[in-house]
Image (tube, rainbow, N blue to C red):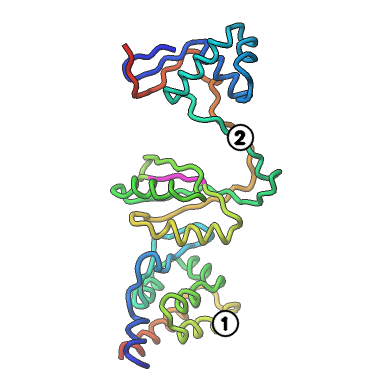
Amino acid sequence: MGSEITSKILRTVPREKAFYFFTSIGNYTGVSASSLKEFMERLNEVDLKSLEFHLYRGDFEKWIDEVLQDPELAGEIRRLPKNSLAGETVRSQLYLAASRRLKKLTS
Amino acid sequence: MKLRSGSTVLDDVDLKILEALQEDARQTYTGIGKHLGIAHSTVYDRIKRMEQYGIIKKYVVEVDAEKAGAKNITAIMTIYTDPKESEVVAEELSKTPEVLEVYTSLSEELLIIAKVVAENQESLHTFIANSIAPLPGVLRIRTSIVTKKFKDTPFSISSKPKLMFIKGTHNMK
């Protein structure tokens, strides 16, 4: 992958483009992420309810695809077996996907 | 109507005129005068002065949104903010057409309370995620979607004591 594309995916986006973690419609947790690295870190901190809320709505892959412009990670998250994921498995699966991708991009 | 330093004192006649206008703002000066037993010129004079001093702010039409076919949802947002940024956040919120009312409140933390309307839950969420959460100083947001309205009445002059002191900026000797 070209270094230009890699830099684009790894960049820090302006705050209006950041990912804002909600637990339900209109209920913002106060946690946000402005880059892939920050996103990965926040996955470990944020309320599990928030991860479930966004996972089932498809918000993660949408943000990763449209804002970070990383279709590969977006696709991986889209393919997660959402209906069979529950509890902390949601967190671990998301974290695994994001950290694997970050490692690949930074190595 | 008498004006004191920094305050406006309304007398019985002013209050009765306001009460009549709140019932029906389209009444004529003659109609109000007849009802109150005073000359229409007095009604005219009092109303003009109350408009001049900002006691009467505007005449508006109250629309029944449901009957008008608007299928909106209403929500009450409680926004927890960094105290240094709360004024700016409240001002920014006030600029958006989706937000109808904005208040600040000091309880344990500094809060902004705002009433917001949206077409549906998804557009409400998009609006909050894209326009409110990114504002600098917003710490977190709690949103309650209104499911049923029991009362929605504008402030009525008749519900207040007869003599009112309204804080103003005009002085008159």
**Residue plotted at (40% across, 11% down):** B2
Q: CA distance from mark 1 to mark 2?
A: 53 Å
Number of marks drawn: 2
Q: Is residue A42 left or right of residue B20?
A: left
Q: Which residues are magenta?
A: B111-115
Which percent across, then down, holds residue B129? 46, 61
Q: Is residue B39 left or right of residue A92?
A: right
Q: Can you tell which of label 1 and label 2 is closer to the viewer?
A: 2
Q: Is residue B6 magenta?
A: no
Asked whether A93 or A60 is in front, the reply is A60
Which percent across, then down, holds residue B65? 65, 44
- Label 2 packing within 10 angstroms: few (<14), some (14-19), many (20+): few
**Chain of the residue on which disc 1 is drawn:** A
**Chain of the residue on which disc 2 is drawn:** B
Asked whether A34 or B62 is in front, the reply is B62
What amino acid is at disc 2? Answer: Val
**Residue plotted at (37% across, 50% down):** B89
- Quarter holding the N terminus of chain B is top left
What amino acid is at disc 1? Answer: Pro
